[in-house]
Every structure is written in C-alpha cells, then in structure tokens.
Amino acid sequence: MKTLIHKSNTRGHAKHGWLDAHHSFSFGQWYNPERVHFGKLRVLNDDIVKAGFGFGKHPHDNMEIITIPLSGALEHKDSTGGHGVIAKNDVQVMSAGSGIEHSEFNHSKTEDVNLFQLWIFTNKENVAPRYDQQTFSSADRQNKFQTVVSPFGNDGLWIYQDAWVSLGNFDAENLSSYQVKKEGNGIYLLVIEGEVEIDGNILSKRDAIGIWDTHAINILSKTNTEILLVEVPMN
C-alpha cells in the first residue's frame, strides 16, 4: 500500500472577497507541480461563497463535475436548460461533454454556502452534456459509506468514469473499512469533520490521504467524523 498525506494547511488558498476557496490540487493562480491531480481526480475545491454572490456563466468541456453542498444552498443554471437548487444532503453531477456553459450562485441573500466541487477526468469524450441531482438520506451513511456517484450503467447519479464518490458519518471509536471497487483504482479520502487514524496516520478536519496499491483500507474514527471518499483510476 502506498500513501501520501495532504494536510489542510498545505492546500492552495484564494480569497476574492465574495469567495473563500481552498484547493486540494493546483487550480487558478495556485500551482504546485506535486499536486496537479490524484489519478483521474483533477480538482477538489472547498469553497465558501458569500450570500448573494456566485460564479457567472462560464464554459467547461470533457470533464465530470460533482458538487456537494455542506451548508447553505447553491443555485445552478446551464446551457442545456438544466436548473436546480442544491443544499446539504444533495449531490449534483454535470457531464460537461462536448461543451456546456453554466453558472452557480448562492441561492440565499443572507447565508453563506459552503461546498465541495470535484472535477474527474472523463473516459468518454464529446458526449452530450447532461445535468442531474439527487437528495440522499444522511441516515444511510451512519457508520458506513454511502455511494452518491458511481460509473455509467449504475442506478442513481453516474459519470463517464470508473470512479465512485462516497460519504460517511462515523461515531467515535468506530472501526470501519472500505473495499476498492475496481482493481487498480486508488482512494482519496478527505476528513470533512472530526479525526481519524488510517495506517498509523492521524488526520483531522480537512486533512486528506491518498492511498493506492491496495484492495482495502481500515479507518478508525477517533471522534465523531464525517468523511468524503473518492475512488478513481490511477492512470
């Protein structure tokens, strides 16, 4: 098993007044040659968007874009006619495909929105752009991992890549495990809240660990913990 550790305070940071963003991988004006991507995971941004503000219409192509709100609500509009508002326990998927323009604004005029946005390289280029969203029950991820995004051909939210995105909420002193779903895939695990121990490494809020060349990992929650886990092909 091979591992790398990304402590929360080593992430890129950009503050634009209306936007407070932390980047797990090189993004915008922040570039770290050792942190361009993890396998097919290209972007993992932790954004706080102030009330009444957001990202104006902008283009993407040939990327799978996944948005997970942690608090507040985000409004999405795109050039396919897709339109929706997502909040905590919702997940949004957008296959940019052959090209799409979209905007994302804080839906509230009074409350900030905090969200994760992930970009995953696609395995099928120039597909028809598409948008989908789904609400998940937090009860279904208590002391276990809940898959919220999976590859094309599966039920629920899917993307054009052999990748899985999962969320989990774990009680203190809970020992859990995760089995890699496809041979050769790696795991990028980020602690949303709390503290965990993995392979002797202690990870706290917003710390992350990349793991590959293994079939499974064990996770000991030192406190009540929330986890984001992304399984992706490594090449």
Image: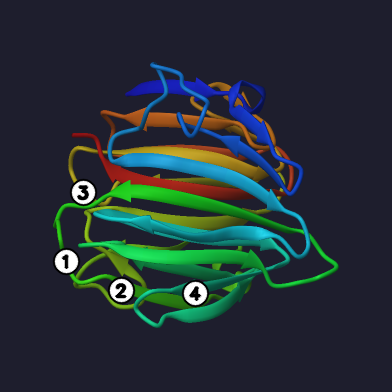
User: Type of residue at label 2?
Assistant: Arg
Quadrant in which residue 110 is drawn: bottom right
The residue located at (54%, 43%) in the rendering is 45
Q: Is mark 3 on a helix, strand or loop?
A: loop
State the residue position of label 4. 77
Distance from Cα at disc 2 to Cα at disc 3: 25 Å
In the picture, the disc for residue 182 is 3
Q: Can residue 86 be seen in this view?
A: yes
Residue found at the far right of this picture: 110
Q: Earlier in the sequence, mark 2 or mark 3?
A: 2
State the residue position of label 2. 130
Looking at the rendered image, the disc whose residue lies closer to the viewer, 2 or 3, is 2
Quadrant, the N terminus: top left
Q: Name the one closer to the observer, 163 or 51.
A: 51
Left or right side of 140 for 235 = left
Crowding at mark 2 (Cα within 10 Å: few <14, some 14-19, many 20+): some
Looking at the rendered image, the disc whose residue lies closer to the viewer, 3 or 4, is 4
Q: Is mark 4 on a helix, strand or loop?
A: strand
Q: Name the one closer to the observer, 109 or 95.
A: 109
Distance from Cα at disc 1 to Cα at disc 3: 23 Å
User: Type of residue at label 1?
Assistant: Val
The residue located at (55%, 35%) in the rendering is 23
The residue located at (72%, 42%) in the rendering is 194
Quadrant in which residue 14 is drawn: top right
Distance from Cα at disc 4 to Cα at disc 2: 12 Å
